[in-house]
Amino acid sequence: MAAVAGTLIGIAIFGIILGVFVRDRIRRISNVLFGTNDLLKGIRERELEVSETPKSVSGAESMYGPMVIKDFSELNLQELKAMAEKAITQAFLAIEKKNTAAFSDVPRVQAWIQSEIEDHRSESIQYDELKFHTTVLNRYIKTGGMATLKF
């Protein structure tokens, strides 16, 4: 009977030592990976950071660029990118100036501008230092007599 009790106490002590060792290892790994001893907190913070991190821009210029040049040799992709950036800048300026008539030739953009103006009716909106980090050709769609470039 004493031998059984001794064995059970030995197993319990081994379990406690193993538990402390595993807990210590998890804390060290968590500290190295996430800068905190709490593994679950580190994982949650990392997930939040990943969800808030801007995603990369998907460019397919190497694939679509030659197709566009083949079909439209007179087009300059760099100029088209600059035109797209200018149009976006003008849309934000229209919101700043509360110009609801801007982009009347592009109904979806005009509707977006009007919606932004209405959403911020009582506020003064200002977009300072708009900056385009990367503009890429993302898609080239050619159907029938119409070709669409998406940047």
Image (cartoon, grey):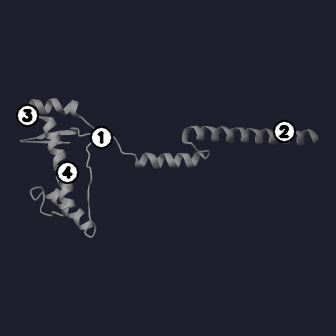
In the image, residue 119 above or below residue 6: below
Q: Amino acid at mark 3?
A: Phe
- Tell which tag, 3 or 2, sits nearer the viewer: 3
Which structural element holds mark 2?
helix
Q: Which labelled disc corresponds to residue 10?
A: 2
Neighbor class of circle 1 (other Cα within 10 Å; few <14, some 14-19, many 20+) is few
Q: Which residue is mark 4?
A: 89
Q: Which residue is mark 1?
A: 57
Neighbor class of circle 4 (other Cα within 10 Å; few <14, some 14-19, many 20+) is some
Quadrant for the C terminus in the image: top left
Callout 2–callout 4 Cβ contact below 8 Å? no
- Residue 112 x %, y %: 21, 59
- The answer to which of marks 4 and 1 sits earlier in the sequence is 1
Q: Amino acid at mark 2?
A: Gly
- Tell which tag, 2 or 4, sits nearer the viewer: 4
- Residue 138 x %, y %: 23, 39
- The answer to which of marks 3 and 2 sits earlier in the sequence is 2
- The answer to which of marks 3 and 4 sits earlier in the sequence is 3
Q: Which residue is mark 3?
A: 72
Residue 144 image-quadrant placement: top left
Q: Which labelled disc corresponds to residue 14?
A: none
- The answer to which of marks 2 and 4 sits earlier in the sequence is 2
Q: Amino acid at mark 1?
A: Val
Which structural element holds mark 1?
loop
Quadrant for the N terminus in the image: top right
